[in-house]
Image (cartoon, rainbow, N blue to C red):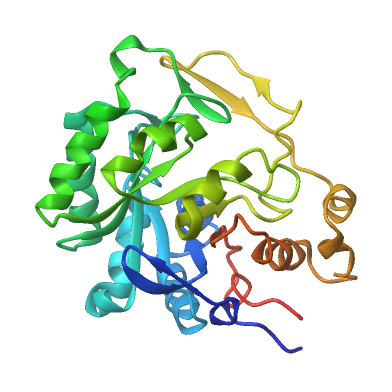
Amino acid sequence: MSTIPARAAGAIALAGRPTARIGYGMGALTGAVSAGRLTGDAAVSLLRHAREEGAQFFDTAEFYGQGLANQLLARAFGSHRDEVVFTTEVGARPVPGAVPMTAAQRPDELRQAVEANLRSLGTDRLDLVHLRRMDMPPGLVITDPQQLVDLDDQLAALEALRESGTIGAIGLSHVSLAQLERALPAGISAVSNIYNLLDRTHEPLLRLAETGAMVWAPTSRSGRRLSRAARPQPAVAGHRRHLLRRPSRREHRRSDPATAAGGARPARCRGLSAMSHRPACSSQRVPPRTRRGDSLSCEP
């Protein structure tokens, strides 16, 4: 079986550096290690293999496994820091329980999150920091008034960190078109929103972001059908959590002509291939499976 490595998808300028379009999302890998389905050593080996296959940016957050995601990255790339781009999120903090994070939107909490990421990654800089807003589903939606923070105040805190050299670039995550337009004067380098073949709600926003558009949930396995599928759950610690249904393979094949030509290829590969040709998709974070070589290579 021949494969297509991540580097074959081309490159974009991410955080001021030429970077392969296909990156590596740490959420699923961290969950596998936390649940005991994968050892830490195997996870580190898998991360290094991803880099060998062409992945350069690794998307993480301190609240993934209460720092575990960052610790795995530090083990994998501590001595090769300049070869990779670390993108992370702030705006939440890890907590124990069924919902493993809670909002941390205040400017002082954003600074604390940046410092926590620096410690657990074992680095002196963060290449790109996404401000994760919690104004709309899916995910946690803030109801606690103390966490309803003005976007300008948040951006001011991140701009100060950028001026000091602690972070290289500022991104936004889970935002509306109006919020992006409001934030652009602050110098926004990337936007990370849900965008896949079944949900193109944010396409105008991602087009505005141009080369800084970073999408997540691009594939059938991790995608969610967001229209009429969101089911609000009871509030948890001042938040509303929305669970979303996965689309079937048949739905995913019908959603775009590019996937119909995929034949018997795995749904993940069909989704990645089709999304790579969407005009609003500059880069994709792959939520990997936990088998070596399965995360970034697809049968053509």
Q: Residue furthest left?
A: 164
Which quadrant of the view contains residue 272? bottom right
Near-viewer residue (155 or 210): 210
Residue 17 relative to residue 122: left or right? right
Residue 93 relative to residue 119: left or right? right
> What residue is shown at x 70% (from left), y 41% (from top)?
224
Near-viewer residue (175 or 238): 175
Tell me the quarter of the image containing the N terminus. bottom right
Say above or below: 61 vs 270. Answer: above
Say above or below: 170 vs 99. Answer: below
Near-viewer residue (129 or 182): 182
Visible residue check, residue 176? no
Residue 98 relative to residue 275: left or right? left
**What percent of the width, then of the height, locates residue 95?**
35, 31
Visible residue check, residue 256? yes
**What percent of the width, then of the height, locates residue 153?**
22, 27
Tell me the quarter of the image containing the C terminus. bottom right
Which quadrant of the view contains residue 127? bottom left
> What residue is shown at x 77% (from left), y 65% (from top)?
270
> What residue is shown at x 28% (from left), y 55% (from top)?
169
**What percent of the width, then of the height, locates residue 263?**
90, 70
Q: Residue furthest top?
A: 145
**What percent of the width, then of the height, locates residue 55?**
47, 74
> What residue is shown at x 35% (from left), y 42% (from top)?
184
